[in-house]
Image (cartoon, rainbow, N blue to C red):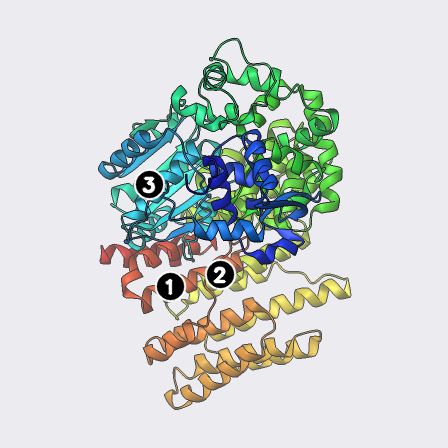
């Protein structure tokens, strides 16, 4: 070799030469120039780099310093840089012939595609896997923990990219559902909650791409059936190809073609150990560790080896973990029970993160944002913990995360630990979590509430919360699993009503309303009457409102008795007047509507913009009978929209404007519709469900290519909003298209 360097030294020089000289004085640096980063890039154990790194230092080609690794905990670590002499030598090195040349036709990667280092002994396996992928619409890559499933998956993904096809990568955790996985794959929103609509949308928009789902064995039983159903429909519709990576047994995945990842052959496994030991020594280590990649990477020179090559888990337990000092073991134990990766700085002992990383115990998300224990390490340590140890760790974690729970993701982890610690007041914590997190984290709450039910002495209220989440998510099958266990009559009736709406059982929903008006407190009766009246007003597609429906709405309102408390009385008056105003507009009684707006102003505490919006809506409806006023009404509505402080009120008014413009000026309707935010959250109220239903309805009118998908989702959202008649009308419209 003309450089005078050994092969490991040249490879290290090439790795470090990729990084700017400006990093030499930076406080925060990439993990790539630390020992763990270099080890992963070159595909060898950490210890194998000590000799070549020392040699490069002695030759004056590199220097070592302490720096803070980005995302890698608070403790500073050794990082490496090229000296000026090292850079001169690096510049003189030719092209790295060991690295394969990239294809000129390259697809785009989306999502959290892991970085890949040098791969040993998998060339034939990768070719076989790619061949299987080429012949099948779906494929599974499976194997033991730590065997290299993800690494092989990344290599296959790179070959797919080389064909010019885009890939979308996502990694599942214990709380993942199909929607959250789509979000991490950077699938464009909005995502329909209706399974058929979602499958059709993905099949049409992403045909020719490949979805890769890593760690599919982590998907909970709560979400797995729907996940598989959507994947099956995508396959049936010949949408994007799909690769599933996970640990056997993956029984639920049926007869999908599998490619099993075996241990490394000894001749390849020894390459993970570097060249600092003799060939015979390396072969002995590799054979004793059964060619298991992670077990080999965990090996430290001088430690005992297993008697046979058949029990990697025992080796991890009896050798790898037994050598840890108390501080490191404690830091590791606090990571063992985590349900998903976390930021290193939020670890129970973030100073231990660097130590664990240098021992190859951690795996990182792309970009070093978050980390978790290697699953082999985690699984082995979990299996050796007693119930008492786990409870103690969960309780300590509660105290820790109470101080660190800054984001909704953190709050989910805190709730997880509270549930697993069997806290006495878990009902209250779950109720609070529903109120604050149901809009953004319904997938996690679905799993957590079911976990809480398993250990609760009286789970009735938890069944109620789990059923509410299922209604929000438009999952009637899951509502059925909980409703019969809800003991409180009012809660049971509420869930039965929501379930009846979801399933389009109008008579049963009406009976539930009547029952609620009988059994509830006066406050509950007031809320239900207002809600029922509002839903009935909205439960239509056409603008006309039959007289019998008007009578029904007015009958609901007769159940309202104004509270004695001035504050509660004012709130009830405002809500009642708003419903009466909507009813007056439906009856085209504009004089009465004006009087009601004056009532709102007199009550006080009402946003002027809200009253302005009500007036603009009235003008828009009135202009239907007086076309000469239409342009004035449109301008009035635009002014009212601009004044709104509430996003919901603003979006509702703009949709009203779009709905009015569709028939008279489609291009202007499209312009206004573009300003309505796409649905990006999971609704947890009938108001938002109704708003989303209207958005999808407008989509069906303005975007013919999405008409079927949009109508399917509008139907689902109407039912979730308690508007089954509107849903039925749209269903008839959909059938006419089919």
**Local SS, label 2:** helix
- The reply, left or right, for residue 596 in relation to residue 692 is right
* Up/down of 161 relative to 608, above or below: above
Mark toward the start of the polypeptide (3 vs 2)? 3
Most foreground residue, 459 or 677: 677
Few, some or many C-alpha atoms within 10 Å of disc 3 (few <14, some 14-19, many ≥20)? many
Q: Nearer the viewer, mark 3 or mark 2?
A: 3
Rendered image: mark on residue 242: 3
Most foreground residue, 704 or 216: 216
User: Are circles 1 and 3 on residues that touch, CB within 8 Å?
Assistant: no
Rendered image: mark on residue 293: none
Residue pictured at 45% horizontal, 31% vertical: 217
Residue pictured at 69% horizontal, 63% vertical: 562
Q: Which residue is mark 1?
A: 697
Give the CA distance from mark 2 to mark 1: 26 Å
> In x, y percent, where is residue 73?
67, 43
- The reply, left or right, for residue 548 in relation to residue 22 is left
User: Are circles 2 and 1 on residues that touch, CB within 8 Å?
Assistant: no
Mark toward the start of the polypeptide (2 vs 1)? 2
* Up/down of 386 relative to 613, above or below: above
Few, some or many C-alpha atoms within 10 Å of disc 1 (few <14, some 14-19, many ≥20)? many
> In x, y percent, where is residue 149?
42, 31
């Amino acid at each position: 070799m003309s450089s005078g360097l050994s092969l490991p030294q040249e490879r290290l020089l090439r790795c470090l030469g990729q990084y700017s000289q400006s990093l030499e004085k930076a406080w925060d640096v990439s993990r790539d120039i630390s020992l763990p980063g270099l080890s992963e890039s070159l595909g060898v154990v950490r210890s194998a780099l000590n000799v070549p790194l020392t040699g490069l230092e002695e030759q004056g080609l590199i220097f070592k310093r302490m720096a803070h690794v980005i995302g890698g905990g608070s403790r500073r670590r050794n990082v490496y840089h090229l000296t000026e002499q090292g850079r001169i030598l690096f510049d003189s090195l030719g092209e790295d012939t060991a690295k394969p040349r990239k294809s000129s036709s390259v697809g785009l990667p989306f999502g959290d595609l892991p970085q890949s280092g040098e791969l040993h002994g998998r060339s034939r396996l990768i070719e076989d896997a790619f061949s299987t992928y080429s012949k099948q619409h779906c494929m599974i890559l499976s194997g033991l923990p730590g065997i290299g499933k993800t690494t092989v998956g990344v290599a296959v993904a790179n070959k797919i990219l080389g064909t010019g096809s885009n890939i979308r990568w996502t990694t599942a955790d214990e709380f993942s559902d199909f929607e959250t996985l789509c979000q991490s794959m950077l699938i464009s929103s909005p995502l329909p909650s209706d399974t058929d609509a979602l499958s059709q949308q993905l099949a049409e928009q992403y045909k020719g791409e490949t979805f890769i789902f890593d760690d599919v064995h982590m998907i909970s039983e709560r979400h797995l059936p729907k996940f598989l159903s959507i994947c099956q429909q995508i396959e049936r519709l010949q949408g994007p190809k799909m690769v599933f990576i996970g640990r056997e047994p993956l029984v639920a995945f049926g007869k999908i073609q599998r490619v099993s990842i075996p241990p490394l052959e000894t001749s390849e496994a020894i390459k993970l150990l570097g060249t600092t030991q003799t060939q015979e020594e390396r072969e002995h280590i590799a054979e004793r560790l059964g060619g298991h990649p992670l077990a080999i990477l965990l090996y430290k020179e001088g430690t005992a080896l297993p008697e046979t090559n058949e029990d990697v888990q025992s080796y991890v337990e009896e050798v790898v973990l037994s050598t840890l000092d108390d501080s490191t073991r404690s830091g590791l134990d606090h990571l063992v029970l985590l349900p998903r990766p976390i930021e290193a700085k939020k670890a129970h002992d973030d100073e231990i993160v660097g130590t664990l990383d240098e021992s190859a115990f951690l795996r990182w998300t792309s970009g070093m944002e978050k980390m978790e224990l290697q699953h082999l390490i985690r699984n082995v340590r979990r299996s050796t913990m007693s119930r008492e140890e786990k409870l103690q760790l969960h309780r300590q974690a509660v105290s820790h995360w109470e101080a660190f729970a800054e984001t909704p993701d953190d709050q989910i982890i805190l709730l997880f630990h509270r549930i697993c610690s069997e806290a006495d007041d878990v009902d209250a914590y779950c109720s609070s979590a529903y109120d604050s997190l149901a809009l953004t984290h319904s997938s996690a709450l679905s799993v957590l509430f079911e976990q809480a039910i398993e250990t609760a002495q009286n789970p009735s209220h938890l069944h109620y919360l789990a059923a509410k989440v299922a209604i929000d998510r438009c999952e009637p099958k899951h509502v059925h699993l909980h409703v019969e266990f809800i003991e409180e009559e009012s809660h049971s009736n509420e869930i039965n009503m929501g379930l009846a709406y979801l399933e389009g059982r109008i008579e049963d929903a009406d009976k539930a309303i009547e029952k609620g008006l009988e059994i509830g407190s006066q406050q509950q009766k007031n809320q239900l009457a207002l809600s029922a009246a509002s839903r009935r007003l909205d439960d239509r597609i056409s603008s006309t409102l039959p007289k019998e429906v008007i009578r029904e709405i007015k009958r609901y309102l007769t159940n309202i008795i104004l509270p004695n408390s001035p504050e509660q009385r004012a709130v009830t008056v405002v809500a009642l007047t708003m419903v009466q105003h909507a009813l007056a507009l439906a009856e085209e009684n504009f004089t009465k509507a004006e009087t009601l707006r004056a009532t709102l102003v007199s009550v006080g505490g009402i946003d002027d913009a809200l009253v302005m919006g009500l007036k603009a809506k009235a003008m828009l409806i009135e202009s239907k009978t007086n076309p000469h006023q239409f342009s004035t009404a449109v301008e009035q509505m635009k002014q009212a929209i601009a004044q709104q402080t509430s996003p919901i009120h603003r979006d509702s008014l703009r949709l009203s404007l779009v709905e009015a413009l569709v028939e008279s000026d489609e291009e202007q309707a499209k312009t206004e519709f573009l300003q309505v935010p796409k649905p990006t959250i999971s609704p947890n109220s009938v108001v938002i469900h109704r708003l989303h239903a209207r958005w999808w309805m407008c989509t069906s009118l303005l975007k013919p290519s999405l008409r079927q998908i949009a109508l399917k989702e509008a139907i689902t959202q109407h039912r979730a909003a308690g508007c089954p008649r509107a849903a039925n009308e749209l269903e008839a419209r959909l059938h006419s298209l089919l």
